[in-house]
Image: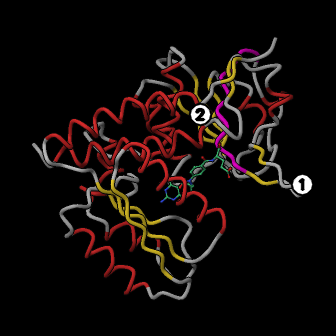
Amino acid sequence: MSAIIISGKELAKEKREQMKGKVKQLGGKGVVPGLAVILVGSDPASQSYVRSKQKACKEIGIHSELEELPETVSEKELLQKIHALNNAPHIHGILVQLPLPKHISEKAVIETIDPAKDVDGFHPINIGRMMTGQEAFLPCTPFGIVEMIKAQQIDIEGKHVVVVGRSNIVGKPVGQLLLNENATVTYCHSRTKNMKQHTKAADILVVAVGKAHFLNREYIKDGAVVIDVGVNRTEEGKLVGDVDFESAKETASHITPVPGGVGPMTITMLLHNTIISAERTLR
Ligand SMILES: Nc1nc2c(c(=O)[nH]1)N[C@@H](CN(C=O)c1ccc(C(=O)N[C@@H](CCC(=O)O)C(=O)O)cc1)CN2
């Protein structure tokens, strides 16, 4: 058996087409959605993600602004920039690209962003709202994963979801979002004993550990849905996921590829959140 490949690239394309219409409608009401992106330092991967975000904004008609700050910028200066953007009426979404240099507190940065403009969905207010099932900006990667599963008409309710990884931006929130959809959720992490015993029990397996080919088919139940969040560059310069795709596709019923799986959906849900934020100004 060979798995159905869930193409995030294709779904992202469809969703972005629909978003163009929404942006046009907003324009007719005098609102142009605006996204501000802050990039600290010159990490090549972060630079590339930020470029992709700006390109995607341009394609669908969202105004975007990039603030590039040197690696040595002080936390105080960064927080001042965020305060200014919180007060800028033409900006509906603010994001600070992660990771940040060690001398800057991620927590302080995230908590300084106005929750009403937190289109990354990282602010504790949005996390709390998400956890209690209230209206919130949802973190883009987990949100994109749920959209991909739903687009395949895969039932989530009652399914056993196993999430490998417990980061604040992917692992923890994806488990919560799937719990909100009535899945039964297990988290595995670096201290989990008998990892294979857990992953083999998963109907839906989400892997977000950031280690190339961390899992193969031996960890996957026949017919499971496998969502690979990892984007790892090998020594040969190839992009691979946390899952050994060639091996896993023989066991899984559905699997996301890397590249072209979860990644493009992350940026698409960021566009979605920015449009929603702009729409809220008309309420
Ligand atoms: N402020 C944020 N920082 C970070 C986030 C985030 O959501 N908000 N997530 C990641 C990085 N990220 C977005 O910022 C991101 C990662 C990967 C992709 C993507 O499209 N990947 C492609 C491959 C890209 C390549 O060729 O290198 C794919 O999987 O097909 C988009 C966005 C950490 N930081």
Q: Dot 1, crowdedness within 10 Å: few (<14), some or many (≥20)?
A: few
Q: Quadrant of the N terminus?
A: top right
The residue under the point 75% across, 52% down is: 232
Residue underneath mark 1: 236
* Earlier sequence position, callout 1 versus callout 2: 2
Residue 128 placement, left or right of 281: right
Is residue 14 placed above or below 258 in the rendered structure?
A: above
Residue underneath mark 2: 9
Q: Residue 45 in the image: state x and y as whole percent.
A: 65, 62
Residue 138 placement, left or right of 189: left
- Viewer-nearest residue: 149 or 54: 54
- Viewer-nearest residue: 78 or 102: 78
Q: Is mark 2 within 8 Å of ligand 1?
A: yes
Q: Quadrant of residue 249?
A: top right
> From mark 1 to mark 2, how far is it between C-alphas?
24 Å
Task: Assign a secondary structure to mark 1.
Answer: loop
Q: Residue 214 in the image: state x and y as whole percent.
A: 80, 44
Q: Which residues are drawn in magenta? A: 222-231
Amino acid type for the residue under numbered disc 1: Glu
Is 140 magenta? The answer is no
Q: Residue 150 in the image: state x and y as whole percent.
A: 48, 21
Q: Quadrant of residue 276?
A: top left
